[in-house]
Image: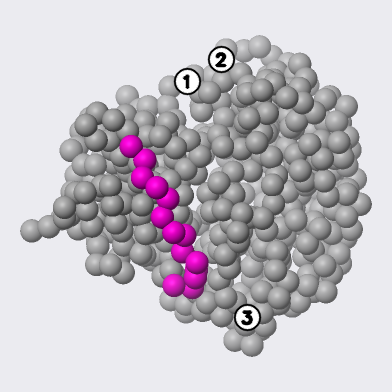
Amino acid sequence: MINKSVLLIQPQWNEIHGMFAKLAKRKFSPPLIGISYLAATLRERGYSVRLIDAEAQQLSHEEVFRIVREENPALIGMTVTTPVFPYAKAMADFLRARVDVPILGGGPHVTTTGMKGLDSCFDFGISGEGENAILHLMDELTGGRNYEKVPNLIYREAGEVRANPQGDKIQCLDTIPFPAVDLLDLSLYRIKVPRKGNQRFTAIVLTRGCPFACSYCAEPNLFGRKVRFRTAKNAADEMEYVVSRFGIRHFVFNDSTLTLRKDLIHGLCDEIINRRLDITWEGWTRADLMQRELLQHMADSGFVRVSMGVESGDMEVLKLIRKDIPLEVTRQAVEDAVSVGIKTECFAMLGLPGETRESVEKTVRFFRSLKKASYNSFSIAIPYPGTELHTMAQKNAHGLELLSEDFYHYRRYEGGAMRVNGMTPKELGHLQKVGLIKMHLTPRKIFSLLWIFGPITLTTVGFRLLFQALFKRKGKPEARAVAEA
């Protein structure tokens, strides 16, 4: 009998946040949207699929191994981002030593590193869009095993690593089945929703691709610069299905630029209102794509929170990263969103091209001045493979110097793989801690932090953060081991 079982795994990943791990977990730990799409596509073709979220379920390698042994799948698939790669590799190595099942790596890391991403623990890799590729791979695994036919596949043959050409991207996103979130324990995914409190939620996407050229972002490498869109009706159909099937009424859109097409968002708002969907929703966009009329319509349909990647408070730095949105446009976007009842969250990075201690201070001052923003984040810029930022760091351009190709150091908190104009990762980490404290020392932001994280968690992490910000301690180097004994 042909084995048509597939096991898809999200490895544990929250360790990448270092001392901020507890805060990160309470802030946002989303359902697995990417591999949920793969699961739905495989299931539609008649394959049996099981999803494991080792992070949400807090599963050790041994516990995952026991599930693998019970399921006896024909294929194990893992989703891999660059910061999570060391943890995914540790899990794959652990399983490789105990079971004789092919292991597939996919996701952003494999896509951007290509053949280098096919570590010895992985038998296969999928670069780019995965739905068609994984279907072809399973057809070959259960049939002729002619892997040359599988688009986007990286594989080993006769001792060599080979990479097949990219297949055609799915142009009509409405044809992709809704993600198989029913394979997850949805009670594990909760988020603080404005005016609603702690709610169950799920993730949803409206687009694939990005037309912008921000130097730090790998998204165009994943899905291309040509943006493909779902229809408003199809997205609303999914939301209505999730509400009726699971009782979930909050949706987080994972699109990097949700409001790229005004007509599409207006159409989605109309669908939500006309169907009388009692939901709330939120998402990411750019400050220069937030018109007040659109924000009002979104708020009327239940949109409650917008997140913006502002990145820096220094216009020279913003120009170097190709995101030179005037700071006053950002300030006005925050004002407009708050005026119609939408909470705003603004995100920045330090250690970008051209960064200096003075530009870091400008960023901190600017974010502190956004008094109506409810939350700020200040992460360390990471030179992800395949990005212009990575190339800049390799070439020592704009004050950057790439210090490591060890992906363990590619962490946005308490990490870093670059020196920037003489500032080491350790110094950037210190500036990050100081900046986070200064950014949030306003009444609105302190209240928001207490609401999001709770007084006990916030106090515990806050005192530790304050201590480390005030006193530069050498301490012992952090343990590098990520594999379980």
Where, quadrant-wise, is the C terminus in this rendering?
top left
Depicted 342 relative to depicted 379: above or below: below
Q: Is residue 447 left or right of residue 35?
A: right
The residue carrying mark 2 is 477
Q: Are marks 3 and 1 in contact (CB under 8 Å)?
A: no
Q: Earlier in the sequence, mark 3 or mark 2?
A: 3
Crowding at mark 2 (Cα within 10 Å: few <14, some 14-19, many 20+): few
Q: Residue 423: which quarter of the image?
A: top right
The kind of residue on which mark 3 rests is Ile
Q: Are marks 2 and 1 in contact (CB under 8 Å)?
A: yes
Secondary-structure class at tag 1: loop
Q: CA distance from mark 3 to mark 2?
A: 51 Å
Q: Residue at x 51, y 26 (%)?
A: 408
Q: Is residue 239 left or right of residue 483?
A: right
The residue carrying mark 3 is 272
Q: Position of residue 126 (x, y in %)?
A: 38, 46
Residue range corresponding to the magenta coloring: 162-175
Depicted 79 relative to depicted 406: above or below: below
Which of 412/458 is in front? 412
Q: Residue at x 71, y 76 (%)?
A: 263
Secondary-structure class at tag 3: helix
Q: Which label is found at residue 69?
A: none
Q: CA distance from mark 2 to mark 1?
A: 9 Å
Q: Residue at x 88, y 49 (%)?
A: 326
The kind of residue on which mark 1 rests is Arg
The residue carrying mark 1 is 480
